[in-house]
Amino acid sequence: MATFTSFSRILCLALASAATSSMAATSSKATPCLDQFYQETAPQLQRESLKKDTTALCLNGFNAMHSGVSKTSFWVAEYLTPERLNVKIKREDSFHEEDLVQGARATLKDYRGSGYDRGHMAPNADMPTKAAQHDSFSLANMVPQTPQNNQQVWRELEEGVRALVTKQKQDVYVITGPEYLGKNIKTIGDGKVLVPTATYKAIYAPQSGVIGAYYVSNDMSEPKPQVELLSICALEEKIGINLFPTLKDSEKRKIYHLPLKASEVKANQTITLNTTDTKSQCATAVTQKQIQTTQKLFQPSASYEGAMADVLAKIKAEPQSQPTTEPKAAEPQSQSTESSGLLKIIMEIVQFLLQLLK
């Protein structure tokens, strides 16, 4: 009976999640895609040159604004929580071209022999489901990154951000992307994929107020790229994007002592304020109409699993039974078979609900 109760609880969880997801379209939230943004508000492209040939992408585990000019995304947004990062999935590389991109895009051939890595903007290690992991290997989530940046400095920064979430048990919103500075920007491949002059990662942790941005040069001549810590305002001024439109400028001007690697994060050690940037020009304020217009661009794709993927993961991870300290008579084989069959039925129901939500 205890097993049946456990299974019933899981089924209720699945049905409740399905109901919540299905009602999202009729609620105040335009789509479940908006969960990846702080206060459901996407970054806003403000420099006119950035707005040409863009495609908004709502993928499993992250969102992106892809450019047909650079053949990369100008930004990629993630919402990291301790629960999300507690799920560990074995890495399975599946680099692929992004079919959802409308217009010019990077191809696998563009990167071959270029000398540059296919550098993740939203890291594979941040992904809580197989579907999210697969989407993280989309070339829409990649930029040409120098090996010394991608494989060392950038990897350590990604680990540092995850440590903020897992060690200090706080949610963090992350916006990651490339910067293209100057007129003579390098390209790779026949598709002329633009090579960033730098990559950035902006973070905001609402519970603690920790905020700031990493800025890393992407120059082949540098054996170990230097990491610069910037205010959100300073970064916005560089890239022409309002990264967190609903945040006050007074918050965006703060620069905390962000960790450069995971070992710098301690569970009970507060991340302190480093300085306040009083010189940079913060991005122009965004109107409510502009926010709503951008929100409507982010619609779930055919492969989007959303909350149901998390339900499936919970079901698969649910222990079959709980050990007891008292001796227990052996259960009849029929009851074990019945429990196994019930779990199979529940899994099939959830899979069916998942298909309905697509």
Image (cartoon, grey):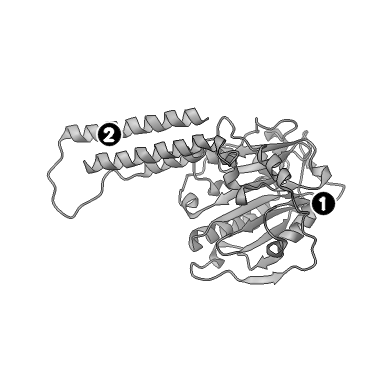
Q: Position of residue 52 (x, y in %)?
A: 80, 38
Residue 64 visible, this angle? yes
Q: Nearer the viewer, residue 33 or 138?
A: 33
Which mark's residue is nearer the viewer, 2 or 1?
2
Identify the residue shown where x is 63% and y is 57%.
203
- Element at badge 1? loop
Three-letter code, disc 2:
Ser
Q: Nearer the viewer, residue 49 or 147?
A: 49
Q: Nearer the viewer, residue 331 or 120?
A: 331
Q: Position of residue 186 (x, y in %)?
A: 81, 45
Q: Residues within 10 Å of mark 1 (few under 14, many from 20)?
A: few
Left or right of residue 316: residue 197: right
- Element at badge 2? helix
Q: Residues within 10 Å of mark 2 (few under 14, many from 20)?
A: few
Labels 2 and 1: the sequence-earlier one: 1
Q: Label 2 belongs to which residue? A: 340
Residue 325, relative to residue 274: is it above or below? above
- Hey, which quadrant is residue 350 in on the image? top left
Left or right of residue 83: residue 281: right
Three-letter code, disc 1:
Leu
Residue 238, relative to residue 69: is it above or below? below
Q: Label 1 belongs to which residue? A: 181
Q: Position of residue 218 (x, y in %)?
A: 74, 53
For marks 2 and 1, give the CA distance.
59 Å
